[in-house]
Amino acid sequence: MFQCKAINFLFIILPLKCWRDFLIRRHIQECPECQEKLASVEEVKPFLIQEEEVGGLEGLWPEIKTKLSEEKRKKQRSLWPRLRWAFRAAGLFVAIAAGIWLYHAFFLDKSPLKESLVERFQINYIRIENKPARAFLFQPHDSEMIFVWAEKNI
Amino acid sequence: MNNKALILGAIFLLGFSFISLQADVNLDIKMRFFGGVREGMAEPPRFVTSSYLQPTVTASIKSKFELAEEQKQIKKIFNLKEVSLITEADLRWASRDSDKIFHIFRLDSKEYLLLITPVSSVRKHQFRIEVFEQSEKGKINLLDTEIILPEKNIAVFGFEDVQGKPYFLSFHITGTKTVLGGVVGGVLSGVVSKEDEEFAKGVVKAEGEIRPPRLIKKVEPVYPEEARKAKVSGVVILSVRTDEKGNVEAVRVLRSVDPLLDQAAIDAVKKWKYEPFIKDGKPRKIVFTVTVRFKLK
């Protein structure tokens, strides 16, 4: 089984027809599994409609080939614009995200907005023993020190 | 060609934003813990055992917020008889390492846990401060607050312990830094000397949630006569290493006051005994910090 897969792989990678023919012929001569499969196909063959029974098949294969290549082209044409837009949107999104981050990391530190954010001391809450506490704030004149006394709410 | 350029551009930006998201934020905070004395009250403890402090050259550089000024203001505003520095620490939060700063210190039989949690990565100066008094009976929350502290300010929080003794915690941001594409295993700012590095090499450090050991035997330091005459007083902060049995085997000075007082503190602390530190069922060596206060009567 493994050998069959290896041959299949070799068939794909070998570009020349003479190599492919040689490869298949040698393998089928030696591989009992492939021989068995071929035998079963041969047995079933009489039950299938034969080429000579259908008739008028001269132009069928070139017709199918043209149709297939047309379909393929259509598919490609409809898929690429969508993919292109997806890539553009992703690139734009990443660029915006990186821009926002860079702005925060390097410029916001010195920007007036950042200054206004950190300019003033602020207490969001104060608790003692997991209960809201009373807070008294003091700031002496000409001092950057802020004093907060916290005590329990009685 | 256009599509290829677009794809390459998208990949580059994606990679760049990935690096950007890895950025580290560092926050340096100077913390001081004071004990207040009201009229008719006993003095706060003279010895404190606390979490390990990384000795760096920057740690010994004088803060523009002078200790004496802080003490003077606290004493004046809260109408206290006296205010003493119990311990101080240069704390660092690095977003890469942990989501919290832990600092544990012991005053006599009581243990205090200080937790600082940065709240927002954009507002680096916004953080939550929690102080707990821990004992065998349980954990009491003495203070829980969330603040925005500008770098120019120093915030002092006053609160009482379970016995009603006043304590004060001061905070001052000494630096915030954003490191693009933070390097894993990077070093902290400040220079660590070779001796300091050797001192704590291969030894458990009492940091994070690792508690400093409990003091079981202490010897009072002898106030040097010369220092007494010269009226020298102050706080000596020491880095201490204990052996597997809890004996003090090495001491280094982190914060010096005067060579005479430093030596007196070292001599006393070398005679102290701690509870052996046990990790994974085995006694281990541990390094932590000890604060000794010298006060003239």
Image: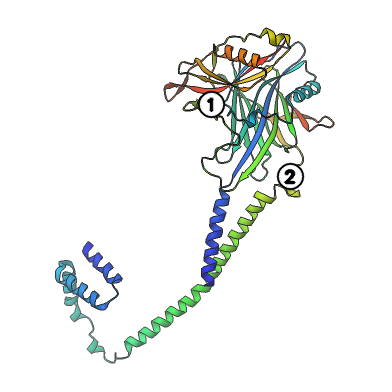
Q: Amino acid at mark 2?
A: Leu
Quarter placement of the N terminus of chain A: bottom left
For residue B218, which quarter of the picture? Answer: top right
Name the residue: 65% across, 28% down. Answer: B60
Tag 1 secondary structure: helix
Using the rendered image of the protein, determine whether residue B46 is visible from the camera's viewpoint. Answer: no
Chain where mark 1 sits: B
Q: Residue at x 56, y 26 (%)?
A: B52
What sort of colour scheme is used for the picture?
rainbow
Question: Between residues A96 and B248, which one lies in front from this camera angle?
Answer: B248
Residue at 36%, 87% in the rendered image = A63
Question: Residue B181: x percent and y percent?
Answer: 56, 48
**x and y percentages locating residue B58 in the rendered image:** 64, 32
Q: Are marks 1 and 2 in contact (CB under 8 Å)?
A: no
Give the distance between the C-alpha atoms of the residues marked 1 and 2, in whole angstroms: 42 Å
Q: Which residue is nearer to you in this view: A119 or B244?
A: B244
Residue at image mark 1: B195
Q: Point out the frontmost of discs 1 and 2.
A: 1
Query: SS class of the residue under badge 2?
Result: helix
Say which mark, if any, is on residue A117.
2
Q: Is residue A137 visible?
A: yes
| Left or right of B208 in this view: B294 | right
Q: Quadrant of residue B162?
A: top right
Task: Identify the image quadrant of residue B30.
Answer: top right
> What residue type is disc 1 on?
Glu
How packed is label 1: few (under 14 Cα within 10 Å), some, or many (20 or more)? few
Q: Is residue A54 above or below residue B244?
A: below
Q: Nearer the viewer, residue B52 or B256?
A: B256
